[in-house]
Image (cartoon, rainbow, N blue to C red):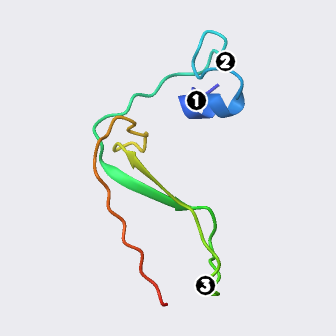
Amino acid sequence: MTPRTARSCATAAATMHACSRSAPTNCMRTTASAAAALQASADRAIIGNDGRDLAFITVRIVDARGVDAPRAAHRVRFTVDGLP
């Protein structure tokens, strides 16, 4: 069986701490390297143009492998543009 990251272990067993003694034996921890990129994702693909719709955007700081870098202390600035 292929080893899984801590994230997939937590998903597979939501009530267990990822990679704890009670977690699946094929679980392994993944440690983040230096921050390398921002990854943004929206909670929906289409936003209505009626002035009342909205979307939540999640931005993560990740290392070169896409692993979350939870201790990254970079300041991120957002600008939202659109028609009034």
- Calculate the distance from the C-alpha at mark 2 to the C-alpha at mark 3: 47 Å
The image's mark for residue 4 is 1
Q: Of 21 and 24, which appears nearest the observer?
A: 21
Asked whether the residues under the numbered discs 2 and 1 touch, taking CB atoms below 8 Å apart as contact, a structural biologist would say yes
Q: Of 61 and 24, which appears nearest the observer?
A: 61
Q: Amino acid at mark 2?
A: Pro
The image's mark for residue 24 is 2
- Compare marks 2 and 3 and give the one earlier in the sequence: 2
Q: Amino acid at mark 1?
A: Arg
The quarter of the picture where the N terminus appears is top right
**In this picture, residue 49 sits left or right of residue 33:** right
Front of the two marks 3 and 1: 3
Residue shown at the point (34%, 34%) measured from the top left: 71
- Calculate the distance from the C-alpha at mark 2 to the C-alpha at mark 1: 10 Å
Q: Position of residue 84 (x, y in %)?
A: 49, 90
Residue shown at the point (67%, 20%) measured from the top left: 16
- Calculate the distance from the C-alpha at mark 3 to the C-alpha at mark 1: 42 Å
Q: Quadrant of residue 24?
A: top right
Q: Element type at marker 1?
A: loop
| 69 up-or-down from 55: above or below | above
Q: Which residue position is annotated with label 3?
A: 51
Q: Element type at marker 3?
A: loop
Q: Amino acid at mark 3?
A: Gly
- Compare marks 3 and 1 and give the one earlier in the sequence: 1
Q: Quadrant of residue 39?
A: bottom left
